[in-house]
């Protein structure tokens, strides 16, 4: 758990302009309120089950295990979730938070488009407009995801400055958010950014570990000896 200032040890916290402090405090208070709400948890769990398709299966990779020798390898199949990745886990939570706070728009950046597709899906589900900023280079590379986002009704903003890739899309999306932080919310796609966003993504993604623990115990009668996870985006 982060401390009262949002630090996970030496990491985290808030390094933001003074004018954003009250906005972040409002988001923190709203999130802590709904996180402990039975009604919110019921709605979240219902959507995880009936919309995302949770629990995702824990699959014994028999042939991979035999090929490598020694270890019995199990895969937590987050790729089988609705929209094809783990991203939908926190996007549903962030969209529900935006609805609870009465926000009129959700903004975000995307690189390959997976976060954009997941967030556009979540916003369409709860009925909130979604605006995704994406570098022009990535738009040209990731045509299938661009098409999906447009079908889902999101406003796609092409970012042409700089390298026209993810880092420029992040800057563009955050600048758009700063223009109207009262009526919009920035749905960060990973455990980055100011508190409370890393805490929120951590909380919404913990369902993966909770399921995997219970599933492995049911299959093997014990906990695994080693767990490996990707940490590119951190979520």
Image (cartoon, rainbow, N blue to C red):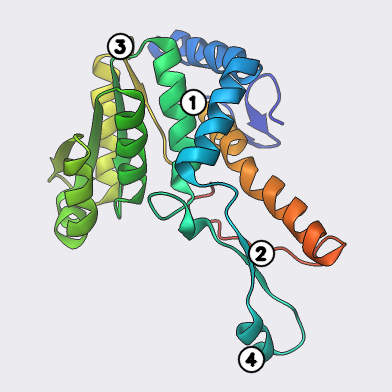
Indicate the quadrant where residue 141 lies.
Answer: bottom left
Closer to us: mark 1 or mark 2? 2
Q: Which residue is mark 1?
A: 15
The disc at residue 67 is 4
Instruction: Please indicate, yes or no, whether residue 48 appears anywhere in the rendered image.
Output: yes
Q: Residue furthest right?
A: 221
Q: Are marks 1 and 3 in contact (CB under 8 Å)?
A: no
Instruction: Please indicate, yes or no, whether residue 190 appears anywhere in the rendered image.
Output: no
Q: Which residue is mark 2?
A: 228
Q: Earlier in the sequence, mark 4 or mark 2?
A: 4
Taking the spot 49% from the left edge, 50% from the top edge, the residue there is: 86
Q: Which residue is mark 3?
A: 183
Residue 67 vertical position relative to residue 35 in the rendered view, above or below: below
Whole-percent x, y for residue 19 in the image? 39, 10
Please tell me whether mark 3 sits on a helix, a strand or a loop.
loop
The disc at residue 211 is none
Q: Earlier in the sequence, mark 1 or mark 4?
A: 1
Whole-percent x, y for residue 87 in the image? 45, 46
């Amino acid at each position: 758990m982060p401390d009262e200032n949002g630090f996970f040890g030496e990491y985290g916290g808030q390094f933001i302009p003074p004018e954003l402090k009250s906005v972040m405090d409002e988001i923190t208070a709203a999130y802590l309120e709904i996180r402990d709400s039975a009604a919110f948890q019921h709605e979240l769990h219902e959507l995880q089950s009936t919309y995302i398709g949770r629990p995702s299966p824990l699959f014994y990779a028999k042939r991979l295990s035999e090929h490598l020798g020694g270890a019995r390898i199990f895969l937590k199949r987050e790729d089988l979730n609705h929209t094809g990745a783990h991203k939908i886990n926190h996007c549903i939570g962030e969209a529900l938070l935006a609805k609870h706070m009465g926000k009129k728009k959700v903004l975000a950046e995307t690189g390959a488009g997976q976060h954009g597709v997941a967030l556009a899906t979540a916003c369409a589900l709860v009925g909130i407009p979604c605006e995704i900023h994406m570098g022009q280079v990535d738009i040209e590379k990731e045509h299938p995801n661009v098409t999906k986002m447009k079908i889902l009704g999101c406003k796609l903003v092409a970012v042409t400055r700089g390298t026209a890739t993810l880092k420029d899309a992040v800057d563009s999306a955050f600048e758009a958010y700063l223009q109207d932080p009262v009526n919009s919310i920035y749905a960060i796609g990973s455990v980055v950014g100011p508190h409370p966003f890393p805490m929120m993504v951590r909380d919404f993604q913990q369902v993966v570990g909770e399921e995997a623990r219970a599933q492995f115990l049911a299959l093997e009668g014990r906990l695994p000896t080693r767990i490996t996870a990707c940490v590119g985006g951190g979520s």
